[in-house]
Amino acid sequence: MSKRVTLFEPPQLDSSKAPIENVLDLTPVDDIGPDVFTNTRPLWHPPGARGIYGGAAIAQSLAAAMRTVPADFAVHSMHCYFVLAGDSEIPILYHVERVRDGRSFITRTVQARQRGRPIFTTTLSFSKANSGGKKKLQHASSMPPVPLPADPASGRQKFDVDNARRGPFESARAGIVNRDSSPEEKKLRRWVRSRGTISDEGAQHAHLSALAYITDSFFIGTVSRVHDVPRFSSAKELQVALKALKNPSDLDDEDIARSLNELKEEEAADLRRRIEGALTKLQDEKAKKDHKEIGMMVSLDHSIYFHNPWKFRADEWMLTEMESPWAGEGRGLVLQRIWAKDGTLIATCTQEGVVRLKQDEPPRAKI
């Protein structure tokens, strides 16, 4: 008998919901407490990662917290810490603590646990709709003029067999600003949206959870991208990572390989562009000496500021723009802005992570 990776037997996929709603579905665990939930379906372990995809813990923690908050309150910020690598072969328990219920603001903390130990923790703040008064100070960063990706001619459906075999969200490259500038001046742009159509039953809570899930994609990897250092240094290394998948979600399988191969092609194109600029043997030797490879890349913390939680759909194209203002001491910081396709700034995110390179010198002998 195969090992169960969820606390309860997962139900059949709900064809009335978008794939991402199925991925992020939660089940209450009333035997433990009134505000305890668990992942309904298996969680994805990305190739080369130490644990589960962090976006799942972020999104499911948000979904759990939202179940304890009145409908006229919406999340405006969440601050997360990745404590331990999550194991995709063990169920997660999400414990929600009702810290404070005020007239305008509500505070919750959520702790995700495996084997009784916290692997992820977040504090969330919710604000009441229209509580700012009639007179307001308002401004927002403008969305850059980037053309929308072309949609398939066949249109989009709520759920189909193809969607069930692909990832719960899709993306399209939107270019790199200041490609030939210093790392801190580069900006990476990408269009993202959840697959299918999010259900009316899921309502805005489903859109917010989907957005939270997507924010962790491509995030800390921005640090290596602005330095033109590939995540996977060879096709063989990529294949090894793909074979190391412990428990891919039943919704993620084929798209994982496609997306990673696309990323590999992007990185290879950047590498070719740099190599073609080497004109002499001396330059070639210098390029070999300066060669860098990622040794470790792990997210430490993740913050999301939700600016307009009522004014977007996660199943419509959203533009993300990422930049890294600083890296050093084996860490890197990335900023991300997200706009709805109508130009509304819907979120600003930050993430810091460990970004360490493979070292040339052999490890020191233990004394």
Image (cartoon, grey):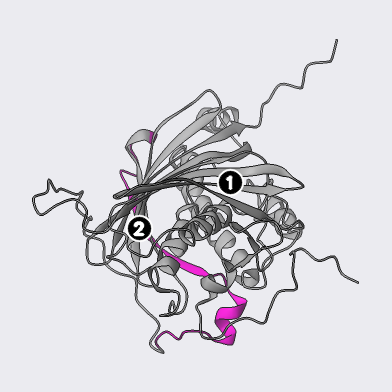
Few, some or many residues within 10 Å of mark 1 (<14, 14–19, 20+):
many
Residue farthest along the left direction in this orientation: 135
Contact (Cβ within 8 Å) of mark 2 with mark 1: no
Residue 150, by quadrant, is bottom left
Q: Earlier in the sequence, mark 2 or mark 1?
A: 2
In the image, 242 versus 117, the foreground residue is: 117
In the image, 357 versus 165, the foreground residue is: 165
In the image, 315 versus 123, the foreground residue is: 123
Q: Position of residue 189 (x, y in %)?
A: 36, 54
Residue found at x 84% / y 15%: 366
Residue 100, by quadrant, is top left
| Quadrant where the C terminus is found in the figure | top right
Label 2 and label 1: CA atoms lie apart by: 36 Å
Amino acid type, label 2: Ala
User: Is residue 23 placed above or below 97 in the rendered structure?
Assistant: below
Q: Is residue 286 left or right of residue 312?
A: right
Amino acid type, label 1: Arg
In the image, 43 versus 77, the foreground residue is: 77
Query: For the residue labelled by badge 2, is the local secondary structure a helix, a strand or a loop?
Result: strand
User: Is residue 267 placed above or below 285 in the rendered structure?
Assistant: below
Q: Position of residue 343 (x, y in %)?
A: 22, 61
Residue found at x 65% / y 63%: 39
Q: Which residue is mark 2?
A: 74
Few, some or many residues within 10 Å of mark 2 (<14, 14–19, 20+):
many
Residue 193 visible (yes or no): no
Residues shaded magenta? 155-183
Q: Which residue is mark 1?
A: 231
User: Is residue 225 placed above or below 260 in the rendered structure?
Assistant: above
Which disc, if any, is residue 158? none
Q: Is residue 10 left or right of residue 56?
A: right
User: Is residue 174 placed above or below 276 in the rendered structure?
Assistant: below
Residue 320 visible (yes or no): yes
